[in-house]
Image (tube, helix red, strand yellow):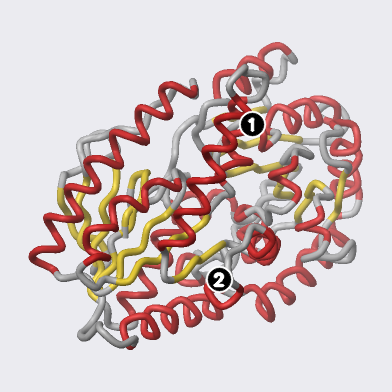
Amino acid sequence: MVVHGPYPIGEARVLREARAAVDAGFEVDVVAMANPGELRRSRVDGVEIYRLPYLRSTRSHPATLVSEYAGFTGLATLAVARLHVVRRYGVIHVHNPPDFLVASALLPRLSGAKLIFDVHDLAPELFALRLAGRRWARAAERALRITESVATRVSDAVVTVHEPYRQELLARGVPDEKIVVVLNALDERLVPSGPPPVAEEGVFRVVYHGTVTPHYGVELLVDAFAAVAGEIRGARLDVYGGGDAVPSVRERVEQLGIGDRVHVGGRVLPQEEVLGRVRGASVGVASQLPLERNQTALPTKLLEFVALGVPVVAADAPAITDSFTEDEIVFFRGGDAMSLADALRRVAADPAAARRRAEAATRRYRRAYSWSIYAERYVQLLEALIAEPGRGGRATSETTSAS
């Protein structure tokens, strides 16, 4: 597997898929970036990890991103080619963004390896947010769409995160038989054992976890929390995660004078640790802004809240309202801080009703969105690919993931 990002910390989707493959008897290698202090090579949960000497930049300037993506792709191409000589991979699984990371798999593919392209995000829409207002934004978007088209064409299978993205890929010309949905569900093995922690007496704990970036609306959440902090007894906001919006979120907290009630972690934590901290919260918030790319995204954090039994407040994006009902989740108008504040008030005012909604959402999750369903689907894809004519033996995955 090849991923533009660190592994295992920071790339939960890659981690889930790699573990599913190992459990099914595949040998799995991951080519990834390095977090500070990590070994260049290590083995975790049966997965061999090859870390390239590349750190993810904390700057979000387009030139920095392009340089980082191109540099990592070049190193990953060399690393995968070198490893393939020895390992003779059956499958190379490349995670986007960037879409041109598929270049790292082309040499093994010429010698018979199958190629999976994993669409975490629709890259043209993702980068349109970063490039908005720049003179060359339109040309860049055209180039990104061409790159996406090439990546899906050269791949033997295109995996993506949910049904709305599958529909969009179909509209862009990707054949139906090539697309497989593997939902970003929570690996049930990571759910902390035992009963959830007892909530602190008189504390209403609001949590957000995941990437802290502008389009996920964390500043909006801070504004909404400030509106209710003085009226909800024991209100507290915990933000777990890192990202380019951490400085602006912290600045907004200070501007509003709520620093004594808000904790902004500012760094990526191991998934097990995050889940342990989130579990038992009064409410979890999925606060993404009503931007085009967010309308078709079903947030991983939302599914994790639901799997953990945490009551959820979420923006009314179509992908979310199509997946859960008002009997399971409290919705607010996307981008509206006062609507979000009202939703928090509603949860705080009736904890019993919040628990009933959370239980109903968890029941739906177990029936339709459980990771065990999608892990089996992913393994079936691997087995189908290596069973095709011209490929024998067991497969190994090399994963590059950029999120």
Quarter in which the N terminus is drawn = bottom left
Mark 2, secondary structure of its residue: strand
Residue 308 lies, with reference to residue 340, above or below; the image says below
Figure label count: 2
Residue 187 lies, with reference to residue 246, above or below; the image says below
Residue 13 x %, y %: 46, 59
Label 2 neighbour load within 10 Å: few <14, some 14-19, many 20+: many
Q: Nearer the viewer, residue 356 or 179?
A: 179
Res 403 label: none
Residue 89 x %, y %: 21, 70
Tag 2: residue type?
Ile
Q: Quadrant location of residue 27?
A: bottom left
Tag 1: residue type?
Leu
Q: Residue at x 67, y 50 (%)?
A: 281
Q: Residue at x 31, y 82 (%)?
A: 386
Label 1 neighbour load within 10 Å: few <14, some 14-19, many 20+: some
Furthest residue to the top?
Answer: 255
Q: Nearer the viewer, residue 283 or 87?
A: 87
Q: Residue at x 41, y 62 (%)?
A: 154
Q: Residue at x 71, y 45 (%)?
A: 294
Residue 25 x %, y %: 27, 82
Residue marked by disc 1: 129
Q: Earlier in the sequence, mark 2 or mark 1?
A: 1
Mark 1, secondary structure of its residue: helix
Residue marked by disc 2: 179
Cα distance between the residues tagged 2 and 1: 26 Å
Is label 2 or label 1 in front?
2
